[in-house]
């Protein structure tokens, strides 16, 4: 009996001392500088539940269509969240003219982290939702506004969670998050006259009137419709044309993290989206990460611009794939 006790004490000592040698969980000795293990900063862990909640919170306001109370209330929510995460926030109010000459009271919402840095990355998404379900199977819905759970809210939800992560761990560079308004007020299918440039009104305004004079960023990433179950992200062609190295960096990073089933190694279509105006107006190479389905006529999901663009399509695993990939890029891009 005595022997057993001595052995168990000896074994316990060995376990304790071997644990002590593992190092990382040990508190750093006072006065000693911590040794950097790699020339790579650790990337925060993206919380998909949090991104899901930010998406849900936007949808709960109702459709965020310009000139509606839901739109105004959601604008306040988004600015409040960015301020809570320590960003310098710009609320850029605009009067825009829609395809049918409706005056839109619109607002771009911008959060700048490390605003003094010259080394900047731009992340953006549109926060408005479409006033028309003009691709709905039921014509009676064509003039109904949509929830835009994926088309709008998901990209903003992921960027809010990225902002929260930045508030807890400084990436050591400038990050600008822009929520563009009035992306999705473009000419509806039921109006036949062609009018150019009726989409992306908020980014068109910003490209001519950036929140900071001579605004520059090394590159930009647009997240659009990035939250649905089994989404597929093909390499959008304007992105490939103007920002091929960023496309490759993002798609390679996603594959290395195990998200290759979402980030498909093939070209998609040319898509009219906010990135085009940021590229053309500010000369910043930008990519558009957007759920693309080469099998459908529109190129987008079956719920696109229908009353079915609801929270039911939103999947935490897709949000995680997107958020973790973008975090990895912004924390480790040399
Ligand atoms: C157009 O349908 C013109 N562009 C696709 C970009 C888009 C619409 N993103 C969200 N809604
Ligand atoms: Zn849309």
Image: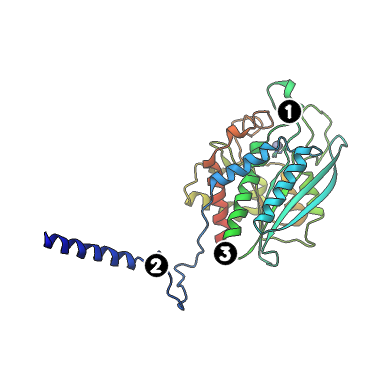
Q: Nearer the viewer, residue 272 or 113?
A: 113
Disc ID at residue 334: 3
Earlier residue among tags 2 and 1: 2
Q: Under tag 3, what secondary structure?
A: loop
Q: How many C-alpha atoms fall within 10 Å of the one at disc 1: few (<14), some, or many (≥20)? A: many
Residues at discs 2 and 3 in contact (Cβ within 8 Å): no
Residue under label 2: 26
Q: Look at the numbered disc 2 and give the secondary structure of its residue.
A: loop
Task: Check contact, mark 1 vs mark 3: CB within 8 A.
Answer: no
Image spot of residue 252 (x, y percent)? 52, 52
Q: Quadrant of residue 24?
A: bottom left
The structure residue drawn at horizontal position 29% and vertical position 64%, both measured from the top left corner, is 16
The answer to whether residue 236 of the structure is visible from this angle is no
Q: How is the image coloured?
A: rainbow
Residue 310 visible here: yes
**Ligand 2 quarter of the rendering:** top right
Classify the position of the C terminus by image quarter. bottom right
Q: Is residue 149 or residue 201 the one in the foreground?
A: 149
Residue picked out by circle 1: 134
Q: In terms of sequence position, does the residue under pointer 1 or pointer 3 come before the other?
A: 1
Q: Residue furthest front?
A: 2
Q: Nearer the viewer, residue 76 or 148?
A: 76
State the image coordinates of residue 323 (x, y, percent, origin top left). Answer: 56, 49
At a point 58% along the width and 42% down the height, the residue shown is 52
């Amino acid at each position: 009996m005595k022997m057993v006790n001595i052995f168990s004490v000896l074994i316990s000592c060995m376990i304790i001392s071997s644990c002590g040698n593992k190092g990382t969980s040990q508190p750093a000795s006072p006065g000693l500088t911590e040794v950097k293990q790699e020339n790579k900063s650790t990337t925060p862990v993206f919380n998909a539940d949090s991104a899901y909640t930010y998406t849900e919170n936007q949808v709960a306001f109702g459709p965020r269509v310009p000139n509606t109370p839901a739109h105004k209330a959601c604008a306040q929510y988004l600015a409040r969240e960015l301020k809570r995460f320590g960003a310098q926030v710009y609320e850029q109010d605009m009067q825009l003219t829609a395809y049918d000459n409706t005056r839109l009271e619109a607002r771009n919402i911008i959060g700048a982290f490390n605003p003094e840095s010259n080394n900047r990355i731009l992340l953006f998404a549109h926060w408005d939702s479409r006033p028309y379900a003009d691709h709905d199977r039921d014509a009676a819905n064509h003039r109904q506004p949509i929830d835009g759970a994926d088309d709008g809210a998901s990209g903003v939800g992921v960027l809010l969670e990225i902002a929260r992560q930045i508030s807890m761990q400084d990436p050591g560079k400038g990050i600008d998050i822009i929520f563009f308004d009035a992306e999705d007020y473009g000419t509806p299918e039921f109006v036949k006259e062609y009018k150019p440039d009726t989409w992306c009104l908020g980014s068109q305004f910003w490209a001519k009137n950036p929140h900071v004079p001579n605004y520059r960023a090394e590159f930009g990433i647009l997240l659009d419709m990035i939250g649905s179950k089994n989404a597929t992200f093909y390499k959008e062609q304007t992105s490939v044309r103007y920002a091929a190295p960023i496309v490759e960096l993002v798609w390679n990073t996603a594959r290395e993290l195990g998200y290759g089933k979402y980030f498909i190694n093939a070209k998609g279509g040319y898509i009219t989206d906010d990135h085009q105006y940021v590229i053309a107006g500010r000369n910043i190479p930008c990519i558009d990460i957007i759920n693309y389905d080469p099998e459908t006529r529109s190129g987008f999901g079956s719920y696109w611009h229908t009353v079915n663009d609801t929270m039911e399509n939103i999947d935490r695993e897709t949000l995680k794939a997107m958020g973790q990939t973008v975090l990895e890029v912004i924390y480790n891009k040399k």
